[in-house]
Amino acid sequence: MEAYLEESAKAPKRPGPWSDPFLLGINLAGVLISPFLVVHKLRRFAAYRNVDEVNPERWAIKPLNPAATEMALKRPGPHVMIVGASFGELLLMERVTEELEGRLGPIGISWVLRDRETVRQAMRFHPERSVAYWPFDSLFPVLRLLRSMRPDLMVMTERYRAANLVVGASRMGIPTVLINGRWRRRPPFVEAFQRGFAKKLLGSFRTLLFQSQVHLDSAKPLLHCDQVVRITGDLKYDLRQKDLAPNAARSLEAWLGEGAPILMAGSTDVPAEEEMVVAAFLKVRREAKCRLLIAPRRPNRSDEVLRLLERHGLKASLRSAPSSDADVFVLDTMGELAGAYRYGVAAYVGGSFSGMGHNVIEPVAYGIPVAYGMRRGHFETMQKLCERHGVGFRVADAAALADVWRRAILDREFVEGVRAKGELLVETQRGAMRTTVDALEAEVVNLRKRGGRAA
């Protein structure tokens, strides 16, 4: 932590966000193109049934549990606001909060989350935690968030392309830290077009903690010399295999029951991806007895999955409405997928078929091979590492996925090799949590020295 303390300078007080030409400019541009943005969001909502595209609670921002927020603000020392998008980030935020409170004792920590279902999960399992919605990236809801939550330190978890929030916090004198950061190189004409925006965005962070040297090298031309910049590794390797509550674990095990091996398809995003998964399952089932579990990324898409299975003549069982003798299990709940991987023999992790991918290390941590689509997205480094260790497999179609799944059922030597190599991979990549919390602890200590307030 001492290294971070030496480099952390006092956060300068600056004029408020209303006087910033950059913020005024992007908000004026937002107003001008708002009709097109509305149409775009409605189309995405219709295509993916993602209520977070149109959720009015992300505009009229307020603490969702005011009593917990007031308690966080009354705790000694600075108030830390940790921001994350969806359930994957929530898992990281839980661990970071646990580690930070373990070192510093009770301090005020609030969570700001984007996805409605993730917010519900956070409030269900952490009713004592101060929680608010991540606002749409417009100055009005952003200022409502910052003024209602009154953070002294803001921590962005992985996703941070929210200029009003990041730059606005900086203009209000709130030191901002990026953890588990990523920055990808883009084609030269794209980089030239967005260079001014990217420099303003990244330059508003006080401390940037990147996952790898690749990400740091990509971002380096956009940074300035007085920022604290470190490579910490990827926090996802430090996530413990989170056990479900005893009742939930017993219920899940009873639902899956005993029988043929289970092939897992987690976090599938679009119907075409589920079509591929089902086609691969049908190919494997011709040669070996097996069952399939599908966990759509958004549980409200489970009815689409059920219609797909019905067209293929497959009997399905919903987690929320179990039935016996199923060919396919549809996990239509949140928070159980990571624990469910322990019951599988192989996995496919969705999102890389048409999106930006999802965490592929969760099944590897249980010693089973993981497959994923051709789009690297945000998980390129993790996917390539899994491939080098022989536990990750990039698949282009149902036939390629079926080949991986078939080996996981029929080739015992392959299964044992994946288990040993997966354990080694996860163990050698751990350590990001310690260095990340070192940096956050230094920020809190510096704020305490200044009286506990950022500005």
Image: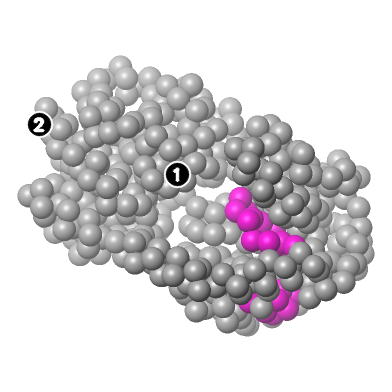
The quadrant of the picture occupied by the N terminus is top right
| Residue 126 point in image, percent of width and height | 53, 68
- Upstream in the sequence, badge 1 or badge 2? 2
x, y percent for residue 371: 36, 33
- The amino acid sitting under disc 1 is Gly
Residue drawn where x is 25% and y is 41% of the image = 277
Which residue occupies 64% across, 37% down? Answer: 188
Q: Which mark is residue 371?
A: none
Q: What quarter of the picture does the C terminus occupy?
A: bottom right
Residue 103 in the image, given as x and y percentages of width and height: 74, 53
Q: Over which residues does the magenta segment extend?
A: 141-167
Residue depicted at x 25% and y 64%: 320
Left or right: residue 165 versus residue 284 is: right
Secondary structure beneath dot 2 equals loop
Q: Indicate yes or no whether the magenta region holds residue 166.
A: yes
- Toward the viewer: 223 or 85? 223
| Circle 2: residue type | Arg
Q: Mark 1 vs mark 2: give the one in front.
A: 1
Say which of 451 and 106 sits in front: 451
- Above or below: residue 316 compared with residue 51: above
Q: State the residue lying farthest toward the top.
A: 413
Local packing at callout 2 (Cα closer than 10 Å; few below 14, some 14-19, many 20+) is: few
Disc 1 vs disc 2: Cβ atoms closer than 8 Å? no
- Image side of residue 84 versus residue 4, left or right: left
Q: Residue at x 41, y 70 (%)?
A: 42
